[in-house]
Image (cartoon, rainbow, N blue to C red):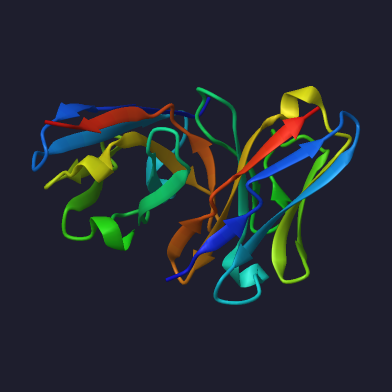
Amino acid sequence: EVQLMESGGGLVQPGGSLRLSCAASGFTFSDYWMTWVRQAPGKGLEWVVNINEDGSEKTYVDSVKGRFTISRDNAKNSLYLQLNSLGVEDTAVYYCARGTVTLPGTDYWGQGTLVSVSS
Amino acid sequence: QTVVTQEPSLTVSPGGTVTLTCASNTGAVTSSHFPNWFQQKPGQAPRSLIYSTSHKHSWTPARFSGSLLGGKAALTLAGVQPEDEADYYCLLDSGGVWVFGGGTNLIVL
């Protein structure tokens, strides 16, 4: 059974940092590219970043470039998102999702982890 | 910057058929945008329904179908069930950059 489990969310002050993790199981992690999507409270979905199978290609939404960094450890079946210089606008539930094998898209999603940025 | 537009809200009767659309401000949506559709119910994570315009996942009910219609991506629900009441989001790939639509709140009434 494919499972994705996010962790690392919490309350942080503006300007602070957090590192989110996504633990994957039930599939060969290194065969799939992965993505992070976020959702602010009461708002719609916002794509954040994609990473390819070996971590050599990363694509970010403009609003997080230079502040967020995606990475993966295929030996640990884990995906990460380093969040720096956080602002109140980054408050959201952050979801990790698995990419489809052959075409742009996703299939399995985690349950999300909440990041709250507030003083 | 690509802006993706969906109907904010639609209402459908149980057993009826409804089509949700997904438009881009840059022009016609084509198969090269690889449209995806997602369903999200209150308090739950999104669930992928359709990828690459019309491909279904193993869990996608047969009553859901994706297509291109009049320059937009479309999600059609035929024989709507009460449990289909949810928010639906489309996603377009614009040269590797993904953009979600604002979502459609589907009411089954």
Which residue is farthest bottom?
A: B27
Name the residue at 71% across, 29% down: B85
Expressed as whole percent of the image width and height from the top left, the position of residue A6 reads 33, 29
Work out whether residue B27 or residue A2 is closer to the camera in this orientation and state it.
B27
Name the residue at 90% across, 37% down: B16
Residue A103 shows in the view: no
Name the residue at 44% across, 30% down: A110
Q: Is residue B38 above or below residue A7?
A: below
For the N terminus of chain B, the quadrant is bottom left
Report the number of numbered marks. Answer: 0
Q: Is residue A21 above or below residue B94?
A: above
Q: Is residue A32 above or below residue A113?
A: below
Name the residue at 78% across, 70% down: B70
Name the quadrant containing residue B29: bottom right
Horizontal arrangement in the rendering, residue B24 relative to residue A87 (left or right): right
For the C terminus of chain B, the quadrant is top right
Work out whether residue B28 or residue A55 is closer to the camera in this orientation and state it.
B28
Expressed as whole percent of the image width and height from the top left, the position of residue A48 reads 35, 51
Residue B52 shows in the view: yes
Horizontal arrangement in the rendering, residue A108 relative to residue A41 (left or right): right
Q: Is residue A80 above or below residue B44?
A: below
Expressed as whole percent of the image width and height from the top left, the position of residue B73 reads 69, 61
Work out whether residue B109 or residue A63 is closer to the camera in this orientation and state it.
B109
Horizontal arrangement in the rendering, residue A6 relative to residue B109 (left or right): left
Expressed as whole percent of the image width and height from the top left, the position of residue B63 reads 83, 38
